[in-house]
């Protein structure tokens, strides 16, 4: 039972890490878009 719990914990951590990476990618894309917009304004 402990092994199953550990596996579930590892899966949760992996999912959280993936979500954080997706969030970082979204932020990077938004930053890139904002920079592009700023350059077009000049």
Image: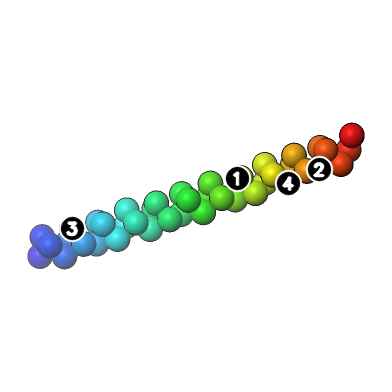
Q: CA distance from mark 1 to mark 2?
A: 15 Å
Q: Which residue is mark 1?
A: 27
Residue 27 image position (x, y, % from top left): 60, 45
Residue 30 image position (x, y, % from top left): 67, 46
- The answer to the question of whether label 3 and label 2 lie on touching residues, with beta carbons closer than 8 A, is no
The label shown at residue 6 is: 3
Residue 41 image position (x, y, % from top left): 88, 38
Q: Which residue is mark 4?
A: 33
Of the numbered discs 1 and 2, the one sitting upstream in the chain is 1
Look at discs 3 and 2 and give the one toward the viewer.
2
Q: Which residue is mark 2?
A: 37
Residue that appears at 69% across and 44% down: 32
Of the numbered discs 3 and 1, the one sitting upstream in the chain is 3
Q: CA distance from mark 3 to mark 4?
A: 40 Å
Residue that appears at 53% across and 46% down: 24
Q: Secondary structure at mark 3?
A: helix
* Screen quadrant of the C terminus: top right
Residue that appears at 73% across and 46% down: 33
Q: Quadrant of residue 36?
A: top right
Residue 37 image position (x, y, % from top left): 81, 43
* Screen quadrant of the N terminus: bottom left
Q: CA distance from mark 2 to mark 4?
A: 6 Å
Q: CA distance from mark 3 to mark 1?
A: 31 Å
Of the numbered discs 4 and 1, the one sitting upstream in the chain is 1
């Amino acid at each position: 039972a402990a092994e199953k719990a550990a596996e579930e914990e590892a899966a949760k951590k992996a999912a959280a890490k993936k979500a954080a990476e997706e969030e970082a990618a979204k932020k990077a894309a938004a930053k890139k878009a904002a920079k592009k917009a700023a350059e077009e304004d000049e």
